[in-house]
């Protein structure tokens, strides 16, 4: 299983409603992409205080690296999501890894 983790640190001007809209749009990508096996996410709430200012974190799972590649480079819904939400983010963190491959 390929794990794709995405974290958003929003600009100070972004409202709570805009953040919720980003969540709705990202979660809906699982219904449109055809390659996402599952998606989950939420607000960063670590009691350790090591969230580095990120507001929302998501985990998307893919069966194969080729599926993630398709999603990142060719998935029309993902491209629209990026264009609509890109201006809201101060920073985006992305980690990709294969489960249990060390």
Image (cartoon, rainbow, N blue to C red):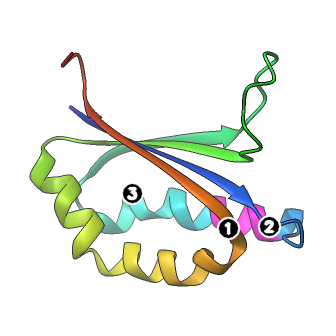
Percent of width and height locating residue 35: 22, 56
Disc 2 from disc 3: Cα separation: 26 Å
Badge 1: residue crowd in 10 Å (few <14, some 14–19, many ≥20) = some
For label 2, the residue is 11
In what quadrant of the picture does the C terminus appear? top left
Residue occupying the point 71% across, 74% down? 88
Q: Position of residue 47 (x, y in %)?
A: 82, 17
Q: Is residue 66 left or right of residue 82?
A: left
* Label whose residue precedes the other's in the sequence (2 or 3): 2
In this picture, which residue range is highlighted in magenta? 18-23
Left or right of residue 87: residue 92: left
Mark linked to residue 53: none
Q: Quadrant of residue 3?
A: top left
Residue in the picture at 58% in, 41% down = 41
State whether residue 70 is above or below residue 2. below
Q: Position of residue 68 (x, y in %)?
A: 22, 54
The residue mark sitting in front, 2 or 3, is 2
Q: Which mark is residue 30?
A: 3
Q: Residue at x 59, y 76 (%)?
A: 86
Q: CA distance from mark 1 to mark 2?
A: 6 Å
Q: Quadrant of residue 72?
A: bottom left
Measure how far apart labels 1 and 3 are at the Cα level.
21 Å
| SS of the residue under disc 3 | helix
Q: Secondary structure at mark 2?
A: loop
Nearer to the camera, 81 or 50: 50
First of labels 1, 3 by sequence position: 3
The residue pinned by badge 1 equals 89
Label 1 SS: strand
């Amino acid at each position: 299983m390929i794990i794709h983790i995405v974290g958003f640190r929003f600009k100070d001007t972004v409202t709570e409603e805009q953040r919720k809209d980003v969540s709705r749009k990202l979660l809906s990508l699982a219904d449109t992409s055809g390659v996402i096996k599952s998606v989950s996410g939420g607000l960063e709430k670590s009691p350790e205080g090591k969230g580095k200012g990120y507001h929302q974190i998501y985990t998307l799972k893919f069966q194969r690296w080729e599926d993630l590649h398709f999603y990142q480079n060719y998935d029309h819904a993902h491209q629209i999501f990026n264009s609509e939400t890109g201006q809201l983010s101060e920073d985006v963190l992305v980690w990709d890894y294969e489960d249990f491959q060390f």
